[in-house]
Amino acid sequence: MKALKLFIFFLIALILIAVFYYGEKSITKGEKYGITIGDSKDKVYSELSGFLSRVKSAGDKVFIRIKVTEASTKLLATDTGFDIFVEPYFHIGSGEEFKQSDRWVFYLNASSLDVVELRFESEKLTEIYRNKRLIELP
């Protein structure tokens, strides 16, 4: 009987941890993590360092996914066409190719379990999306 109570307690604790850890948030108005909906891509890019440091926990690293090109295949020791994770630094005055996309997706610790996405329309930030999961769901 005591073992059953202990098992039920741990089961409930595990369920509560999973429920409170899982989070999907979408911000379409106002400000979050130091950036504001409606900011230009250039302004958001200049604030990426601060934004990402507010999003991640201590010790976390932020990655983006890139497609290996013919030019980078030897440097990265990977075949052309593969997607790989890289840890960017987002230096001011750089990132012109990165800014061309209307979806900026960041993977915390190179995991699809903790993703932050910035979505743009007409060169303006329209949404800050965060999806954080404890386990991979089907």
Image (cartoon, rainbow, N blue to C red):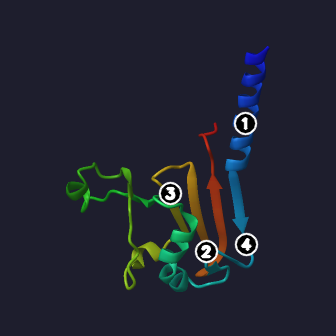
| Residue that carries the numbered disc 3 in the rendered image | 107
User: In screen coordinates, is 74 left or right of 26?
Assistant: left
| Residue at screen point 69% across, 35% down | 14
Q: CA distance from mark 3 to mark 4?
A: 20 Å
| Residue at screen point 38% across, 85% down | 93
| Residue at screen point 38% across, 71% down | 89
Could you tell me residue 37's position as x and y percent? 67, 79
User: At label 4, which amino acid type do we have?
Assistant: Thr
Could you tell me residue 105's position as x and y percent? 53, 63
Residue at the top extreme, as displayed: 1
| Residue that carries the numbered disc 1 in the rendered image | 13
Closer mark to the observer between disc 3 and disc 4: 3
Helix, strand or loop at label 3? It is: strand
User: At label 1, which amino acid type do we have?
Assistant: Ala
User: At label 2, which amino acid type do we have?
Assistant: Phe
Q: CA distance from mark 4 to mark 1?
A: 33 Å
| Residue that carries the numbered disc 4 in the rendered image | 28
Q: Earlier in the sequence, mark 3 or mark 2?
A: 3
For the N terminus, the image quarter is top right
Q: CA distance from mark 2 to mark 4?
A: 11 Å
Which quadrant holds residue 97? bottom left
User: At label 3, which amino acid type do we have?
Assistant: Tyr
Closer mark to the observer between disc 4 and disc 1: 1
| Residue that carries the numbered disc 2 in the rendered image | 120
Helix, strand or loop at label 2? It is: strand
Near mark 1 (Cα within 10 A), the count class, few <14, some 14-19 or many ≥20, is few
User: In screen coordinates, is 4 left or right of 134?
Assistant: right
Closer mark to the observer between disc 3 and disc 2: 3
Could you tell me residue 137's position as x and y percent? 64, 39
Could you tell me residue 53's position as x and y percent? 51, 70
Name the one closer to the observer, 137 or 70.
137
